[in-house]
Image (cartoon, grey):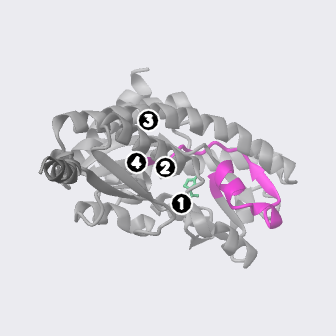
């Protein structure tokens, strides 16, 4: 009898130790530093919550495509997700502050921008039933080209890869045809001869092994877009307080770790492009001036279209150093 009672007790033991399982969707590859950081975040949460919360990471658009992830998490189809913040600009214009060219020139600038942007982003996320957990920047965005570029006129009639509304507008301002290509398909698009240039990180160039077609990389440091990791607020609220605390702490750690990782891979990947035979150069003085002018025009358009929230970020960003 005793044995039976003991066996019965053992059988219910796992149920008493309620385990919650979350799915976290991302559109980037499992090997990318963002995803590795998320996996570490998930492990930290599992450990700190003594297994009460398990977060299963679904990379590479396998659960939902990058662009569908915020809605999937809003609708509770996945409890958590990651996306690139600049993809949210139609609904959250201020998320586009990340991709205004030549505003953020270093990781320290990116940090200042995020500190100012964060409360606004959190407010918009909350209005959608989402909780922002942490954000990590991509390395600085440089210019890749299949042929040397000396003047902005060289882009006229060429095809430029884009990944968000900001890159589409930049392609238009340069007189190039925007070609939307997801990050994980850049190699394929280049091999098929569908692209002449793109603005993205050296890291994305490395991950997509672009050296077959790309001959030039100009480190123009145009902006530092951030990926943001978020969770469905109801799913978060359903957790016991101690587990919520574990998530919040692991998210803060992931943010710190992610920024350091980003800076480290930024350096490494420019070196790797060079080793693979890509010419790493500075933009010519003419091109540099033209790009800066284009950046100013972009900024003016952006501040006008976003309105007051843009001022809430840029006024302190420029005047309260
Ligand atoms: N890589 C991503 C976004 C920014 C970056 O560096 C991409 O090219 O889509």
Q: Which residue is at the front of the view, 115 or 305?
A: 115
Please tell me the numbered disc located at residue 255. 3
Marks 4 and 1, how far apart at CA: 19 Å
Where does residue 212 sit, x and y in percent of width and height? 82, 66
Please tell me the numbered disc located at residue 53. none
Asked whether the viewer can see residue 78, the reply is yes
- Check disc 1 and report its element: helix, strand or loop: helix
Please tell me the numbered disc located at residue 228. 4
Marks 2 and 3, how far apart at CA: 19 Å
The mark nearer the N terminus, 4 or 1, is 1
Q: Residues within 10 Å of mark 3 (few under 14, many from 20)?
A: many
Residue sitting at 39 percent across and 21 percent down?
A: 320
Marks 3 and 4, how far apart at CA: 10 Å
**What is the tally of numbered marks visible in this picture?**
4
Report the span colored magenta.
Answer: 199-227
The mark nearer the N terminus, 1 or 2, is 2
Work out whether 285 lies above or below 57: above
Cβ–Cβ under 8 Å for marks 1 and 2: yes
Residue sitting at 67 percent across and 56 percent down?
A: 207
- Check disc 4 and report its element: helix, strand or loop: strand
Q: Residues within 10 Å of mark 4 (few under 14, many from 20)?
A: some
Where does residue 200 sit, x and y in percent of width and height? 62, 54
Marks 3 and 1, how far apart at CA: 25 Å
Marks 1 and 2, how far apart at CA: 8 Å
Residue highlighted by disc 2:
99
Q: Which residue is at the front of the view, 280 or 46?
A: 46
Q: In screen coordinates, is 53 left or right of 200?
A: left
């Amino acid at each position: 009898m005793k044995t039976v009672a003991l066996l019965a007790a053992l059988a219910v033991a796992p149920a008493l130790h309620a385990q919650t399982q979350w799915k976290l969707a991302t559109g980037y590859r499992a090997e990318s530093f963002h995803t590795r950081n998320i996996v570490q975040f998930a492990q930290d949460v599992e450990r700190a919550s003594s297994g009460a919360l398990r977060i299963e990471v679904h990379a590479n658009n396998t659960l939902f495509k990058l662009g569908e992830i915020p809605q999937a998490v809003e609708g509770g189809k996945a409890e958590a997700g990651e996306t690139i913040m600049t993809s949210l600009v139609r609904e959250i214009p201020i998320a586009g502050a990340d991709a205004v060219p030549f505003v953020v020139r270093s990781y320290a600038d990116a940090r200042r921008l995020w500190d100012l942007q964060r409360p606004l982003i959190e407010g918009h996320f909350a209005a959608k039933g989402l909780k922002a957990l942490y954000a990590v920047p991509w390395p600085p965005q440089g210019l890749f080209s299949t042929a040397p570029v000396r003047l902005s006129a060289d882009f006229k009639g060429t095809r430029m890869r884009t990944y968000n509304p900001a890159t589409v507008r930049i392609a238009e301002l340069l007189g190039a045809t925007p070609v939307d290509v997801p990050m994980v398909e850049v190699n394929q698009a280049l091999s098929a001869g569908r692209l002449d240039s793109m603005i993205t990180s050296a890291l994305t160039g490395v991950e997509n092994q672009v050296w077959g077609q790309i001959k030039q990389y100009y480190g123009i440091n145009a902006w530092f877009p951030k990926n943001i990791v978020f969770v469905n607020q109801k799913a978060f609220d359903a957790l016991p307080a101690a587990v919520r605390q574990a998530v919040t702490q692991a998210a803060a750690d992931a943010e710190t770790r992610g920024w350091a990782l980003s800076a480290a891979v930024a350096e490494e990947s420019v070196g790797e492009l060079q080793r693979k035979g890509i010419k790493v150069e500075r933009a010519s003085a003419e091109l540099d001036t033209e790009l800066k002018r284009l950046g100013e025009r972009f900024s003016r358009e952006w501040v006008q279209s976003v309105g007051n929230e843009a001022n809430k970020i840029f006024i302190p960003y420029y005047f309260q150093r």
